[in-house]
Amino acid sequence: MMLDPGGWEALRLSLFVGVFATLLSLPLALWVAWLLARRDFIGKGLLNALVHLPLVLPPVVTGYLLLIAFGRSGPAGRFLEDTFGLVLAFRWTGAVLAAIIMGFPLMVRAMRLAIEAVDPKIEAAAATLGAPGWAVFSTVTLPLILPGILAGAVMGFAKAIGEFGATITFVANIPGQTQTMPSAIYTLLQVPGGEAEAIRLVLWACLLAVVAVLLSEWLARRVAARIAGG
Amino acid sequence: MSLSVQITHRFGGFTIDTGFETGPGVTALFGRSGAGKTTIVNAVAGLLRPDKGQIIIDGDLVFDHRTGRHLPPHKRALGYVFQDARLFPHLTVLQNLRYGGRFAKRPATISEDGVIALLGLAPLLERHPAALSGGEKQRAALGRALLSRPRMLLMDEPLAALDAPRKQHILPYLERLKAEAGLPILYVSHAVDEIARLADQMILLKDGRVAASGPVFDVMADPAAIPLLGVREAGAVLRATVTDHASDGLSRLQVGAGPLELPGVKAPIGTTLRLRVLAQDVILSLDPPQGLSAVNSLPVTITGIHPGDGPGAAITLDASGERLLARITARTVKTMGLRTGLQCHAIIKAMAVAPGAIGAGPDAL
């Protein structure tokens, strides 16, 4: 299972992008999931479609749209560079953005289902006991949807470490900079004699996926047991 | 402490147009399913915003459609006990009990230990709601509402989801709560027996409107309320004092017009109870009864004869200042020559007063 330095680098970058993207998108995904599950507002359908768009668009298209918007000459890209000195295109930061966008629908979906499963009557009961809106959410809704949040986070993380199409289109495939694990596997398969290293990376990818799923299952079961009074 | 409700609300082709006021003690809101009871309680709690009207709690205008004022539920300081207990599934009973106290701004009127003792919750504190029976859930929910230090308790059919034995088990807790907590209660129910045992005032709803209201002893003895309560459920409520328990299982109770002997009375001697005497269980006799198996006979005066829509007629009776209601056929009224002012005897079959119709605890009146 020992990898070449380039392989380790790609694996490290993928994990880094995965953790970063998951943590960054978690609060926003939770908020959007709550909006979609519990609030009625004008443009709700549009927001729902926008969130789900990356799921149905070809990833290459998403990547290209990101490049147009967040490239150094794109409107959003220029704004971020001028205001915060943040460059996304062809940088690891861009890989994080691509991972966030691609994983977002999966996260929102899992969390929205969890929120919808919470009986609003229980929340109403909390309100009659004197709990203001924020307290109802943090003391009743949040503990009850914790398994859903975990499931969403694992889905988002898994999507982030495996994202390929949008990432390679938006930030290319620069070793040590933007070459994530899937990009590295793709590159190795293009050169003669690269199969052995590619297979080792594939094994690592499988290992990570299995560990992530088992970990989330275990956490979700523990939380569910605690909620049900185990 | 008072509650004043004057609201109009339309939903699904049905209109609620209702106005009433409540004072201290227990006010029952009675109506058949779909009469709009829950809608009204939800409006009082702030969980529903009525189309029009005003709601005033303790002089505090919590809803007024003209100014657009609608105080959110968490600022109304009302304890709501739902039909489906709605305990927090992820918290233990003790954590559920303490939930409301965190947000309460009013001073505590009853201590946590007091509530636990009153409702018999001590053995349940460490359990989660999933491990509780229906009756235990309702007791925990009641305790939780009490400990949120409410100005008033709202109870929406708290016993409707329970089977008859559990209901009989929890009713004494409610009687104790009424006597000890000193909190005004708005008690929603479609069960006449619960209201006969608990309520001081009673409001009868029909199709979203108030059809009758007043002290529970008056409304229950009002012949006009019979179609609203149902002919089998109608009947006056008497106050009776336990004077003796005989060894054969019968107890002697004193009402204004004389003694009654009834089975299944568990309250100690000297306690005042409520007796619900169903109108269909009262037999009228012109002469003092002799050679009858029914032992309970009270001298009464007929105060009114009210023919119903069908073959029945309701007879209102005065029993030494207390009101009784009898339901007999119109033909019997004619053949017996019954008329207002006539003195006769009301015979109540001992077994007809079911144990559930007898209050189990002291009545704070």
Image (tube, grey):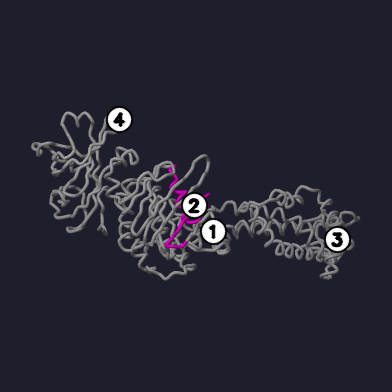
In front of the other: label 3 or label 2? 2
For the residues marked 2 and 4, what is the alpha-carbon distance in whole angstroms? Answer: 39 Å
Image location (x, y in percent) of residue B329: 23, 31
- Relative placement, left or right, of A19 versus B236 is right
In the foreground, B98 or B198: B198
Q: Residues within 10 Å of mark 4 (few under 14, many from 20)?
A: few
Q: Chain of mark 4?
A: B
First-in-chain label (2 vs 4)? 2
Callouts 3 and 2 in the same chain: no
The amino acid type, in three-letter code, at marker 4 is: Gly
What whole-number distance in Å separates the C-alpha atoms at marks 2 and 1?
Answer: 11 Å
Residue A230 visible:
no
Q: Which element carries disc 3, helix, strand or loop?
A: helix
Q: Which residues are magenta?
A: B34-60
| Residue under label 4 | B310
Look at discs 2 and 4 and give the one toward the viewer. 2
Q: Amino acid at mark 2?
A: Gly
Instruction: Give the residue at mark 2.
Output: B53
Element assignment for label 4: loop
Residue in the image at 34% along x and 63% along y: B182
**Subunit under mark 2:** B
**In this figure, which residue is indicated by the disc labeled 3?**
A75
Q: In this orientation, which residue lies closer to the viewer: B316 or B93?
A: B316
Q: Percent position (x, y) of residue A143? A: 56, 61
Give the camera-side residue of A203 and B76.
Answer: B76
Is residue B260 or residue B300 the one in the foreground? B300
Q: Is residue B211 magenta?
A: no
